Amino acid sequence: MIITTTPNVEGRRIVAYHGVVTGEAILGTNVFRDFFASIRDIVGGRSGSYEKSLRQGRELALGEMGDEAQRLGGNAVVGVDLDYENITSGNGSSSMLMVVASGTAVTLE
């Protein structure tokens, strides 16, 4: 499965369009990760645990999107867009990371 942000695949001709496909991943974060990330915000540096969550969410969303494209008969997804959101509860005590991948399922020659 070819997945690309470009509108086409160089050297390959699109012979069929199967429609828009999406993949979503929502991952819960935990209190300890949030606490240590807030410390990193104060002192500076990277948050390895959040980077790992972002990577995991992206892989899950892209995989789900590719599976949907395959179910529709496609062998590629073009024009892929990734969106990230941090969802917090009303009182701010818990948060979740949402990653959404969307694109157009196509069949390449």
Image (spheres, rainbow, N blue to C red):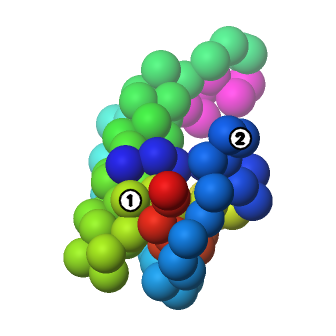
Residue 41 inside the magenta-drawn segment: yes
x, y (%) of residue 101?
A: 53, 64
Q: Residues within 10 Å of mark 2 (few under 14, many from 20)?
A: few
Q: Which residue was labeled with disc 2? A: 10
Image position of 81 (left or right of 51):
right
- CA distance for labels 1 and 2: 15 Å
Q: Residue 75 shows which numbered tag?
A: 1
Residue shown at the point (73%, 25%) measured from the top left: 42
Badge 1 density bin: few <14, some 14–19, many ≥20, Cα 10 Å: some
Q: Is residue 11 above or below residue 101?
A: above
Residue 6 located left or right of residue 20 = right
- Front one among 44 and 107: 107
| Most common secondary structure along the magenta stretch | helix
- Which residue lies at the image location 50% right of the left edge and 56% below the top edge? 109
Relative to the observer, which residue lies in front, 99 or 90? Answer: 99
Q: Is residue 4 visible?
A: yes
Indicate the secondary structure of the residue bearing disc 2.
loop
In the displayed structure image, the side of residue 38 where residue 42 appears, left or right? right
Q: Which residues are magenta?
A: 37-42
Badge 1 marks a residue whose secondary structure is loop
In magenta segment, residue 39: yes
Q: Residue type at mark 2?
A: Glu
Indicate which disc residue 24 carries.
Answer: none
- Give the percent coordinates (x, y) of residue 65: 39, 66
Instruction: Return the residue nearer the eye: 101 or 34.
Output: 101
Point out residue 8 in the picture as x, y percentages from the top left corner: 71, 55
What percent of the width, then of the height, locates residue 45?
68, 13
Of label 1 and label 2, which has the lower sequence position? 2
Q: Hey, which quadrant is residue 79 in on the image?
A: bottom right
